[in-house]
Amino acid sequence: MGRLMCHFIFVHRWLEGTKLTDICSDCEDRSLEQKENLDLIVRAIEMTVSQLIDHGLLHGDPHMGNVLKVRNPKTGKSELGYLDFGLVSYVPQNVRDAIVCAVVQLVFARNLEAVADLFGELGLLPRETLQDAGERKRLLDALRNTLDDVLIWPKNNKGLSTAVPTVRFDNLLPATIKFLRSFEFTMPPYFLNNVRALATLEGMALKLDPDFNVLRVIYPYSINRLMRNPSVSRKVQDTFLDICRNPQTKLLSPRRVRMLLNDWALWTGYRKRKIFWDLATSAGGRRVTPVILKNWLLNRVRYVTNMARGLQYLTARSVQKIRDKVKRKWMATVVADNRLVG
């Protein structure tokens, strides 16, 4: 087929398949077919996120008629078949990096200020608006209210991995429209196509599984991209180091680093050896690893220094107490001697 195409001619081939939302009502294995179709929709979402984050070239219209379940005649297994590549979006590299940073800052760090700062990188708001103190405060308040309406955050998450929030789909559309109307947002075509593509696939998944959570698919891709940073983006690198720091002390937090590595392993299904190898050998990992080691050593030095100061303080207090005790005994002896002499 490639030989038939040129700059002005795009050739398609016929695909025989069924819609992913069509479930045979009379079949005995209805539940198996439903699970198979849901797995294919999840794979379609993963492919869409990969197109968006990894490649920047996205099929912008994956509705029920354009994504089919196709039976492979050689293997007999079901596969995805994409139709109609008439709407394809190109996403710039800086926007792809900003999407990764925004997802991780929101889900992992819950840092709304950092998410708001990325609106400029995403091309949604002019930098003048973000630099204005009054507008920035108004934006943060509106963003916080919108996310409170849309997301349900897990309570008492004290584990060593991040609990992904649940999306309240009944509030998603009205809350988003209200938020967008509050500011003069600029909506690039690729942004609208990205949102529509993911929302369409998400709607297909919800028809088969009402408890489906699209963030559980998007977050693993984002965390994997953040840790590997193949584009060697300074923004991604700064975000990686920022979420590893304690929000209060701004020092590298071993617990946050462990949570980040656990998330990378848990949500992607990678083994710990692989994630350490990827972090050490990837282009972005090679740049942040020395910074992490440097901060870790500085933390150890600070810990030892504080321990030494504490011991020095305790030793000084102990010596002073001994001195005071000896002095009191000496004074008591002197008083007693004076009474005997008198």
Image: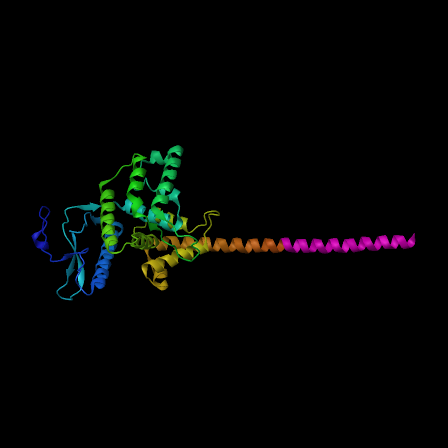
In the displayed structure, 77 sits above or below 304; it is below
156 lies left or right of 311: left
Which residue is drawn at the image coordinates 72% and 56% (left, top)? 322
The reply to whether residue 191 is in sight is yes
Which residue is farthest front? 26
Viewer-nearest residue: 19 or 61:
19
The reply to whether residue 91 is in sight is no
Magenta stretch: residue 154 in it? Answer: no
173 lies left or right of 9: right
Which residue is farthest bottom? 75
In the displayed structure, 145 sits above or below 227; it is above
Magenta residues? 313-342
Quarter of the picture containing the N terminus is bottom left
Magenta stretch: residue 314 in it? Answer: yes
Q: Position of residue 234 (x, y in %)?
A: 35, 47
Viewer-nearest residue: 45 or 4:
45
Q: Position of residue 179 (x, y in %)?
A: 32, 38
Which residue is drawn at the image coordinates 40% and 36% (left, top)? 137
141 lies left or right of 46: right
SS assignment for the magenta stretch, majority? helix
Q: Position of residue 75 (x, y in %)?
A: 16, 66
The image quadrant that residue 174 belongs to is top left
